[in-house]
């Protein structure tokens, strides 16, 4: 933990042990802190976490931060009331991005109409852009409404996608509804990307220019920024109305229908099949089946789905990136009990084939299985060992991964010793104005400066010359 400009920042969000003094949630209860704004700060691969009293406290605090160092993210937990939102990123130049955005807006409008809810594009549709010449990126937030938790947010997302053309559904990210989500705050950017998140107070829909209507008359730059900030934050739900979704009957038949819609034949798993599936997962990771050194532990089972709980950071071969909080799951289907590994962050149908299990009391059925029973018509990742995908290094073994041996040892140290602390970055920046400097090391992110009371600069926006 370190104190910067009077604010306590922690190296971790979740405690790794009881009374973990370096974790934010050791010092503040997530449930009782629903009025707080939980924020993370990312500097390359390093992170800090804190909780502000409210969005105004955050706005005041960030006046002491250089624009190029505005890399703050809002933290949204699963149980926190949260606004509906959509994350759209497109790098494929063949996709008509303007048409995609219009389809998203049209689908949202139709769902809100179906729910008999008032929805006005000038007041409720909030559009944010952080595009570059190589990547189009938009955040869409529905103002004036909120969901009770991330499950409701995901259900609303599903309703909207059902109204969209099939070819556009895969580019609307489903990962922003996970149990712990980071959402970039207005005026901020990914470290060294230069792609600042800005509010689009005007956008075009079906040839018509839509101009945002603010709830109050704007009289100053400071007031403009604080209102834009309040509207953009997902957990700031003051003056918002709960968005009530139709009740869904959670029956076995509903789960059966859902599994079949994803190409799976429904069948409940036995305790033995769950045990064998978890053992297969460990085997693919190169871990002894009796070891407790896996990044995942068993959480629960729902029909043919085995839900896993993440214990620590690991690399995902499906998404080709590291995950810190996402909880994956296994799907076990078919006569030979084919086991697939799924990542919740993956927005398409890609999954990892782990292998097959045959319950001990049913080994005799293997001779009667037709070859087509071993096939699948859904996209499966290439035959890559999951051992490679999580960079796990069993004692005495060597992995033929693209990572160097030193990187592997470093990962193993940080994952299993759990004693690593953020490393310093040697960054050299010049002062940007009088009494205001950017930092030179990780410890100097925020400089102790006096901000003039007459200062009219809005954090995240260019200063007046």
Image (cartoon, rainbow, N blue to C red):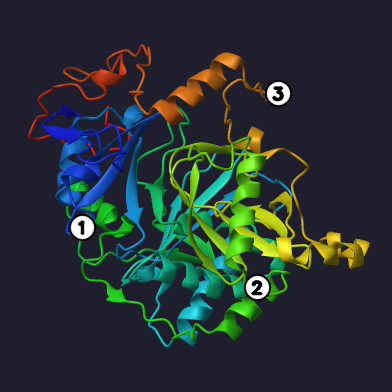
In this rendering, which labeled residue sits more in front, label 3 or label 1? Answer: 3
Q: Which residue is mark 3?
A: 400
- Number of residues whose C-alpha sits closer than 10 Å to that of mark 3, classed few (under 14), some (14–19) or many (20 or more): few
Q: Nearer the viewer, residue 280 or 28?
A: 280
Q: Is residue 330 visible?
A: yes
**Is residue 419 left or right of 363 when viewed as pictured?**
left
Give the mark nearest the N terminus, 1 or 2. 1
The reply to whether dot 1 and dot 2 touch (C-beta < 8 Å) is no
Q: Is residue 23 left or right of residue 252?
A: left
- The residue positioned 41% from the left and 44% from the top of the image is 197
Q: CA distance from mark 2 to mark 3?
A: 36 Å
Mark positioned earlier in the residue sequence (2 or 3):
2
**C-alpha distance separating marks 1 and 2:** 51 Å
Relative to 141, say whether 116 is above or below: below
Instruction: Say which of 48 and 143 sits in front.
Output: 48
State the image coordinates of residue 298 (x, y, percent, origin top left): 49, 54
Tell me the quarter of the image containing the C terminus.
Answer: top left
Q: Which residue sits at x=78%, y=43%?
A: 382
In the rendered structure, are the residues bearing label 2 and label 3 in contact, judged by CB atoms less than 8 Å apart? no
- x and y percentages locating residue 234 in the rendered image: 33, 58
Residue 218 - label: 1
Residue 338 image position (x, y, % from top left): 74, 59
Residue with the mark numbered 2: 259
Residue lying furthest left:
453
């Amino acid at each position: 933990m370190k104190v910067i400009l009077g604010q306590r920042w922690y190296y971790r969000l979740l405690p790794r042990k009881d009374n973990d003094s370096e974790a934010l949630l050791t010092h503040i209860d997530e449930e009782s802190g629903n009025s707080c704004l939980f924020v993370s700060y990312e500097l390359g691969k390093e992170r800090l976490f804190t909780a502000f009293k409210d969005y105004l406290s955050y706005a005041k605090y960030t006046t002491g931060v250089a624009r190029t160092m505005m890399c703050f993210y809002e933290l949204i937990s699963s149980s926190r009331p949260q606004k509906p939102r959509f994350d759209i990123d497109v790098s494929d130049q063949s996709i008509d991005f303007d048409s995609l955005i219009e389809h998203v807006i049209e689908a949202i409008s139709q769902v809100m109409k179906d729910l008999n809810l008032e929805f006005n594009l000038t007041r409720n549709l909030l559009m944010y852009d952080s595009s570059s010449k190589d990547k189009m990126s938009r955040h869409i937030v529905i103002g004036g409404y909120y969901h009770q938790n991330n499950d409701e947010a995901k259900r609303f997302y599903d309703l909207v996608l059902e109204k969209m053309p099939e070819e556009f559904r895969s580019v609307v990210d489903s990962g922003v509804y996970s149990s712990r989500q980071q959402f970039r705050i207005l005026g901020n950017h990914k470290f060294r990307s230069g792609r600042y998140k800005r509010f689009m107070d005007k956008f075009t829909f079906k040839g018509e220019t839509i101009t945002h209507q603010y709830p109050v008359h704007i009289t100053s730059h400071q007031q403009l920024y604080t209102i834009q900030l309040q509207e953009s934050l997902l957990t700031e739900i003051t003056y918002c109305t709960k968005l009530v979704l139709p009740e869904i009957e959670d029956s076995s038949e509903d789960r059966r229908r859902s599994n079949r819609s994803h190409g799976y034949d429904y069948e409940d798993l036995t305790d033995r099949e769950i045990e064998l599936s978890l053992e297969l997962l460990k085997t693919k990771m190169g871990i002894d089946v009796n070891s407790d050194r896996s990044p995942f532990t068993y959480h629960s089972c729902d029909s043919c789905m085995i839900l896993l709980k993440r214990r620590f950071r690991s690399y995902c071969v499906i998404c080709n990136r590291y995950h810190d909080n996402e909880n994956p799951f296994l799907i076990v289907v078919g006569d030979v009990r084919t086991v697939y590994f799924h990542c919740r962050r993956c927005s398409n149908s890609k999954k990892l084939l782990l292998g097959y299990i045959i319950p001990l009391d049913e080994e005799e059925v293997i001779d009667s299985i037709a070859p087509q029973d071993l096939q699948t018509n859904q996209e499966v990742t290439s035959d890559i060992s999951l051992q490679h995908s999580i960079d796990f290094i069993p004692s005495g073994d060597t992995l033929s991964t693209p990572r160097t041996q030193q990187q592997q040892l470093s990962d193993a140290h940080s994952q299993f010793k759990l004693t690593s602390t953020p490393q310093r970055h040697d960054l050299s920046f010049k002062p940007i104005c009088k009494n205001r400097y950017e930092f030179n090391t990780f410890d100097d992110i925020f400089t102790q400066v006096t901000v003039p009371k007459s200062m009219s600069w809005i954090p995240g926006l260019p200063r007046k010359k």
